[in-house]
Image (cartoon, coloured by chain):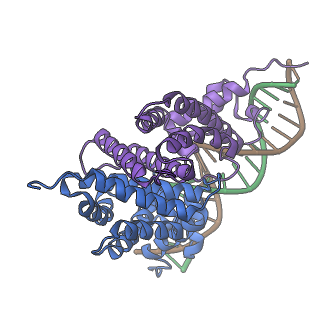
Chain colours: A purple, B blue, C green, D brown
Amino acid sequence: MPTPARTSIEEIVAAGRRVVATDGLDGLTMQRVAELAGVRAPSLYKRVPSRAALVRLVAEDLLRDLSAALAGAVGSGDDQLRRLAVAFREFALAEPGVLALVFAPLPTAMAPSPQALAVAAEPVLKVAGQLVGDGQALEAARTITAWATGFVRMELQGGFELGGSVPRAFDYGIRALALGLAASRPPMPGL
Amino acid sequence: MPTPARTSIEEIVAAGRRVVATDGLDGLTMQRVAELAGVRAPSLYKRVPSRAALVRLVAEDLLRDLSAALAGAVGSGDDQLRRLAVAFREFALAEPGVLALVFAPLPTAMAPSPQALAVAAEPVLKVAGQLVGDGQALEAARTITAWATGFVRMELQGGFELGGSVPRAFDYGIRALALGLAASRPPMPGL
DNA sequence: ACCTGAACACCGTTCAAGT
DNA sequence: ACCTGAACACCGTTCAAGT
């Protein structure tokens, strides 16, 4: 006598995202997620093999939205780095889980797939290429990513104890990076 | 009839550091630390009020050593930013716990004190001041810190899936930052 | 088929009892 | 004064039993 499904994988992942956004990765317990999904914890194992797998699904869900936000922010013009950085900061402040689940060293079973990460990296590589040319795009993209993730993590951590304006420091960093990357650009061949 | 002490707060913190270095923050359980300290878990509560407090003690212990490493790396010359960044990277690769306990959003009870963080920030502010002058030292220091912590975290995470040389990307970032910060420097008054 | 309570092995923490 | 086993409330996970 089949019982009708009372939840779904989509609902479970959405519940996981809600919990992560409010209580962080440690708050993502099977019982809390089950409660939000309207079932008991053991029922989750019908759709998800383990908590680690659920964490990964939530990470990849976040990553999909982040990729869309970044891709939507960049276009053409001379302030692509700023638009990219601002889009990333806004997303990460709204969904702090992205730093805990996507840009953090997690056990392999929880980490999002390299493919999912590559999709998010695309807009960064594009902007980096515009700034420094294709030959250095990868190194420049890594510099941008390292700075942006490091900055927002410090901000979320409350790591700006020494005073000063956080948005001003963000702006300062964007400008310094843009200047520094442009200065790193090799001379155009033939010029 | 007093029982002789079989461990000490120093030994407990040292055990905590060893566990964090190998198994990360999640591996820091009271039972594992107690085992390394040669006692049972309940005995730890004679010296430490909670796991959160122990995490903080380990974080501040790491931070003390990091501060010393950074202060020892900077001197005078034209490659201070490089020496600072290299010292930070080497420390964080040897003691990955520093990123998990010091440069991560943790509950207040686990986070190191602002004073301890300020000590570690001093060499960074010094180098930043040399590069851009005192007026922008704070913003420049934040840019440096955000980039360096973000970079090494990506490295520890294995987040360099797209190929290329990691040390080369680190060097590239140092150079771009040095160029960008120098270009941000306001003109000297009177020149 | 899916859902559940009960059970198991963990974890942090408390506490009475031992020396 | 410190150490310990036992206990409690949690957690992830399994599984037999229910529908």
Residue B150 visible in rendering: yes
Q: Compared with residue C16, is residue A36 higher up or lower down, i.e. above or below?
A: above
Q: Is residue A187 left or right of residue B182?
A: right
Give the left or right position of residue A73, taking residue B113 as reference: right
Query: Viewed as shown, does residue A114 lie left or right of C17?
Result: right
Q: Is residue B112 something one can see in this rendering?
A: no
Residue B183 locus on image (x, y percent):
29, 53
Q: How many marks?
A: 0
Q: In the picture shown, does residue A9 fall above or below B85?
A: above
- Give the quarter of the figure containing the N terminus of chain A: top right
Residue A20 location, quadrant: top right
- Residues B123 and B133: in front is B133
Residue B68 lies in what quarter of the image?
Answer: bottom left
Query: Which residue corresponds to the image point at 60% horizontal and 53% vertical from the top-left?
Result: B159
Is B81 situated above or below A63? below
Residue B52 on image: x %, y %? 46, 56
Q: Residue at x 63, y 43 (%)?
A: A117
Residue furthest to the left in view is: B190
Q: Nearer the viewer, residue B138 or B1?
A: B138
Please give left or right for residue A35 compared with residue A151 in the image. Answer: right
Residue A64 vs residue A129, the one in the foreground: A129
Residue A68 image-quadrant placement: top right
Name, please, the residue furthest toward the front. A190
From the top left corner, tell me how far across and down residue B57 is, in percent: 41, 64
Q: Residue at x 64, y 38 (%)?
A: A119
Which residue sits at x=44%, y=31%? A77
The location of residue D9, given as percent across then percent down, is 57, 43
